[in-house]
């Protein structure tokens, strides 16, 4: 009777929908599981599942080096497939020497290595990996303790010709390394105790000419030790991101950033000095991705977020600071004034959010006037939650001392006024529109976004007489100020 039941159960299992799945398809299911434990559980369901899963060598290539027996089983089942190794040695954890020795016998199959631990343990771990690893494509070293770990150039015999991705967090290395011709991604995360000099980085970049993604976090010094005329070309660069406690963009003065690349700078300051002229490159000559600027977005909120677009590339600058001696409006003012340090003659779109005008400034001293004056090609201006009067006065040729027509090509003006603002924030709008129209610079599109009416019916009617299209929306929808 028991034999009959076994046969019946076997027949049922054979015709179960899951067991009708082709083995080559069924073996892909573990790709959607997150842990080794789940994979191992699947091998214990039945003999058929076990055979299928064990036969797929690529399922057994991730070695966490926590258990000698498990590591041995994985190496055996992975057969000749390339291996991904993760070693964690936190705090007082003993290094898994026996497991490492087993892994090192197969170093010729190593495709990815991650080392995680304290500075002391990382230093010991790195010494184990002194033999060449011809297939190594990814190397990640992350130091958990405050003290940096030294990564010697002798790691893997000093030959990293197959390496495509390098991530060092808290690991100091004597750049440049040799044979980095395949490297495409570089991520360095340091601190003030293990800065890498500009010259070291430039030497490294010259040997890793395929780099297309670079991320530097707290890894740059405050000044350059390279000759001012030295410029290194990165022809394949697509993304460069620099994050630091203080603004570090001096590196950009030494790089030729190609068309199409994205550059992002993030920093924090305790000084009221504007970061734009001081910390952007002295010259935009090397930034081919923004050789001329077509669009600028600015948002002020305990700092500045600026996004610059060129015809085929972008530059993002994100900064925050805390200087109690200087009120935020004055900081914002200095940022806005310094826009004229940039090549903005070709700018067609400008969006500004949360800008407050410092008191006691006349029109010519205002950030609005200094920023808009060079923008002869500006066609669209969006002001979101701003004190708009200084911009309105600047655009009115009858209200500035030079009587100059600022932004003569301006076609569209968008004003978003939140509930807390009042009529004073659009004072002079009708007069400005009328004066520009009388001089042949008629605005074709005006959009006012506000939860309540700020213009009287007559003012609104008059405004429509001097602009081709006027849109008055009684809502609080804030236009997107940046392109992300």
Image (cartoon, rainbow, N blue to C red):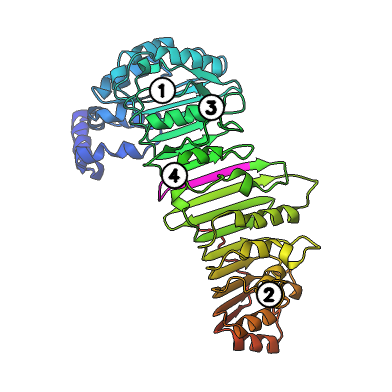
| Mark 3 burial class by Cα count in 10 Å: few <14, some 14-19, many 20+ | many
Label number found at residue 403: 2
Label number found at residue 310: none
In this rendering, position of residue 41 left or right of residue 413: left
N-term-proximal mark, 1 vs 4: 1
Q: Which SS class for mark 4?
A: loop
At horizontal 19% and vertical 29% (from top left) the residue drawn is: 3
Indicate whether 418 appears above or below 241.
below
Asked if residue 18 is among those painted magenta in the image, a careful observer would answer no
Give the Cα distance between marks 1 and 4.
22 Å
**Residue 36 position by quadrant:** top left
Give the Cα distance between marks 1 and 2.
61 Å
Quadrant of the image containing the N terminus: top left
> Which residue, given by chain and number where applicable, does mark 1 sit on?
177
Give the Cα distance between marks 3 and 1.
13 Å
Give the Cα distance between marks 4 and 3.
20 Å
Query: Visible in this render: residue 385?
Result: no
Q: How far across and how far down the image is residue 248, in percent? A: 59, 38
Q: Which SS class for mark 3?
A: loop
């Amino acid at each position: 009777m028991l034999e009959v039941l076994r046969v019946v159960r076997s027949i049922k299992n054979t015709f179960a929908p899951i067991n009708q799945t082709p083995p080559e398809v069924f073996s892909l299911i573990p790709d959607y599981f997150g842990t080794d434990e789940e994979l191992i559980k699947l091998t214990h369901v039945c003999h058929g599942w076990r055979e299928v899963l064990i036969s797929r060598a690529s399922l057994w290539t991730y070695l966490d080096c926590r258990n000698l027996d498990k590591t041995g089983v994985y190496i055996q089942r992975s057969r000749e497939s390339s291996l991904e190794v993760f070693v964690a040695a936190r705090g007082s954890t003993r290094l898994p020497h026996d497991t490492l020795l087993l892994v090192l016998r197969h170093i010729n199959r190593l495709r990815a290595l991650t080392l995680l631990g304290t500075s002391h343990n990382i230093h010991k771990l790195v010494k184990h990996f002194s033999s060449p690893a011809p297939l190594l494509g990814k190397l990640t070293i992350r130091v958990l303790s405050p003290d940096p770990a030294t990564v010697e150039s002798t790691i893997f015999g000093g030959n990293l010709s197959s390496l495509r991705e390098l991530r060092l967090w808290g690991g100091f290395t004597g750049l440049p390394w040799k044979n980095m011709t395949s490297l495409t991604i570089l991520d360095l995360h340091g601190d003030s105790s293990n800065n890498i000099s500009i010259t070291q980085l430039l030497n490294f970049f010259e040997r890793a000419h395929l780099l297309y993604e670079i991320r530097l976090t707290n890894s740059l010094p405050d000044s350059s030790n390279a000759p001012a005329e030295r410029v290194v070309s990165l022809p394949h660069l697509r993304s460069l991101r620099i994050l630091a406690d203080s603004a570090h963009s001096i590196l950009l003065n030494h790089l030729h950033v190609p068309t199409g690349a994205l550059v992002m700078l993030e920093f924090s300051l305790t000084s009221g000095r504007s970061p734009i002229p001081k910390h952007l490159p002295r010259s935009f000559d090397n930034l081919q991705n923004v050789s001329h600027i077509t669009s600028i977005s600015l948002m002020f909120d305990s700092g500045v977020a600026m996004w610059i677009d060129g015809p085929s590339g972008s530059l993002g600058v994100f900064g925050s600071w805390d200087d109690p001696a200087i009120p935020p409006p004055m900081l914002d003012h200095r940022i806005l004034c310094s826009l004229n340090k940039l090549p903005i003659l070709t700018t067609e779109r400008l969006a500004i959010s949360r800008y407050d005008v410092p008191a006691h400034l006349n029109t010519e001293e205002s950030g609005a006037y200094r920023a808009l004056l060079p923008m002869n090609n500006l066609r669209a201006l969006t002001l979101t939650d701003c004190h708009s009067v200084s911009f309105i006065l600047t655009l009115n040729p009858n209200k500035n001392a030079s009587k100059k027509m600022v932004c003569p090509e301006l076609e569209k003006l968008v004003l978003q006024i939140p509930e807390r603002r009042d009529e004073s924030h659009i004072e002079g709008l009708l007069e400005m529109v009328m004066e520009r129209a009388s001089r042949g610079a008629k605005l074709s599109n005006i959009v006012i976004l506000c939860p309540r009416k700020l213009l009287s019916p007559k003012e609104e009617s008059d405004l429509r007489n001097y602009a081709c299209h006027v849109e008055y929306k009684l809502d609080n929808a804030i236009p997107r100020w940046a392109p992300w």
